[in-house]
Image (spheres, grey):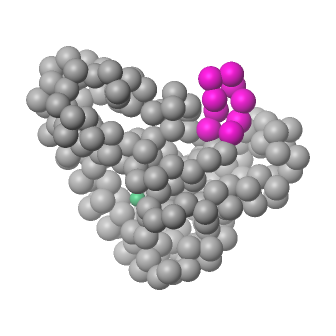
Amino acid sequence: MKYPFSLPKLDYAYEALEPYIDRSTMEIHYAKHHLSYVNKLNEVVEKYSDLQKMELNELMENIKSLAMDEGDRNILKNNGGGHFNHGLYWKIMGPTKELDESLIGRIKSEFGSVEEFKTQLTNQALGRFGSGWAWLVEGGNGKLELYSTGNQDSPYLNKHKPLIGVDVWEHAYYLKYQNRRAEYLENWWNVLKIF
Ligand code: MN3
């Protein structure tokens, strides 16, 4: 993915994830929040022709060393992360299961069982104070790891490849679940299509 960035096509309807994620949340989340990350990302990259040639993961991986204004660097980190993170989130969810047997096998060998993995990822998501994400990532050595990040910080900032990410900003669940993050997370597993 390179400049100019665009909103990825959602391959299911806004209401397709009901009753676990409601139509309004999906529409606002995708068409307002995600679009705003894309627009702000394009605005900042527009100023730097060198950055326009780079892939988004390269921009994130090298964020500290890019020749740019510090305020712009922060805008790039937040909105580049926002664009990447949401792209993955839409892709791993869906109304019908499409099991990723290879990833399930790796998860079982790393965490003992899928249930144990779900418990640990949920705990990361519950433990994130304020807005952020919980992740399953692949580290440089190919090892699977779990952690959470604040704001829109992307695992690519750590040079890790995100495999599964769950959004725990209130905008992801507040309309339906209000302050009940645990209930959103419990229901979220139903719309994660790869398990
Ligand atoms: Mn979000």
Task: Classify residue 70 as left or right of residue 147.
Answer: left
Quadrant (top left, top right, bottom left, bottom right) of the N terminus: top left
Residue positioned 24% across, 54% down in the render: 36
Residue at 68% across / 55% down in the picture? 121
Q: Residue furthest left?
A: 47
Left or right: 21 with respect to 82? Answer: right
- Closer-to-camera residue (95/126): 126
| Magenta highlight range | 137-145
Number of numbered markers: 0
Residue 138, magenta (yes or no): yes
Give the x, y percent position of residue 3: 24, 29
Of 62 and 17, which appears nearest the observer? 62
> Where is residue 189 shown, x and y percent of the image?
66, 63
Point out residue 145 in the picture as x, y percentages from the top left corner: 68, 39
Rendering quarter of residue 141 = top right
Picture quarter with ligand 1: bottom left
The residue lying at 27 percent from left, 41 percent from top is: 74
Q: Position of residue 12 (x, y in %)?
A: 46, 58
Q: Is residue 136 visible?
A: yes
